[in-house]
Image (cartoon, grey):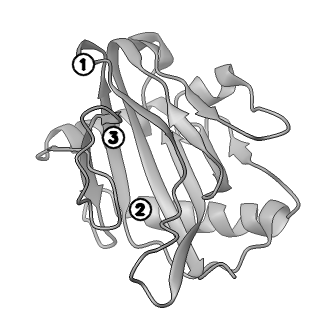
Amino acid sequence: MRGEWAYYKNKYSKERCDFIINVAKSRPANDAKMGVNGESETNNYRKSKVRWVYPGDLQLGFLFTDIWAMAMETNNQFFDFHLSKLDYLQIAEYDGDQRGEYKKHQDVFWMNNDPKYHRKLSVIIQLSDPTTYDNGDFQMYGVQEHPKSEDLRSQGTVIFFPSFIEHAALPVTMGMRYSIAGWIDGPKWK
């Protein structure tokens, strides 16, 4: 592997991020779950609301084209993984009143029931203006070098990293943080 992470600072404009947030807020939100099929309750581990986006979405479908193109470019430069598909995106809402967070975890479901695929490359898009919430930073663990936290907090920044790297969304203590998470799958790790 040639890299641990790569990011595009301010890849999306404030206007584009605000548009995505407003579309998301117009849709029903669910309490975040964990596990292969979302079967695990997360009360003490993950406190957030989520909304799902699928290819062909009339308002947000452009995200799939954008993310796939960035993922292929980033993968060619940094990771060299075998990648196959991007099935869905998750828009997360971390509320400071609830101390919204997602504690340390990694994104690969090693023992999933899928005979072909594992998550290989994770992507996070920072949607919120960093002046609208306190704390809530994205954090990676076990990497040799950490990205600049102020860059990752910049609205519109996109970060890619291998799905097996442990990471967290630290607690938001005031305001609301919105982000997009996605996972590019590839043939199972061997």
Task: Identify which residue is drawn at 64% across, 60% down.
Answer: 70
Compared to residue 11, the image places residue 165 above or below, namely: below
Q: Estimate the x, y position of residue 89 in percent, counting from the top left.
A: 38, 58
Q: Residues within 10 Å of mark 2 (few under 14, many from 20)?
A: few
* Mark 2 and mark 3: Cα distance apart in space: 18 Å
Q: Is residue 31 left or right of residue 61?
A: left
Compared to residue 167, the image places residue 117 above or below, namely: below
Task: Identify which residue is drawn at 49% across, 17% down.
Answer: 130
Q: Which secondary structure, mark 3?
A: strand
Q: Earlier in the sequence, mark 2 or mark 1?
A: 2
Q: What residue is shown with label 3? A: 92
* Mark 2 and mark 1: Cα distance apart in space: 31 Å
Q: Which secondary structure, mark 1?
A: helix
Task: Identify which residue is drawn at 74% across, 60% down.
Answer: 74
Q: What residue is shown with label 2? A: 62
- Check residue 163 in the rendering and tell me which mark sits there, or answer none: none
Give the amino acid type for the residue marked by disc 1 in the picture: Gln
Disc 2 and disc 3 in contact, CB within 8 angstroms: no
* Nearer mark to the viewer, of 2 and 3: 3
Q: Residues within 10 Å of mark 3 (few under 14, many from 20)?
A: many
* Nearer mark to the viewer, of 1 and 3: 1
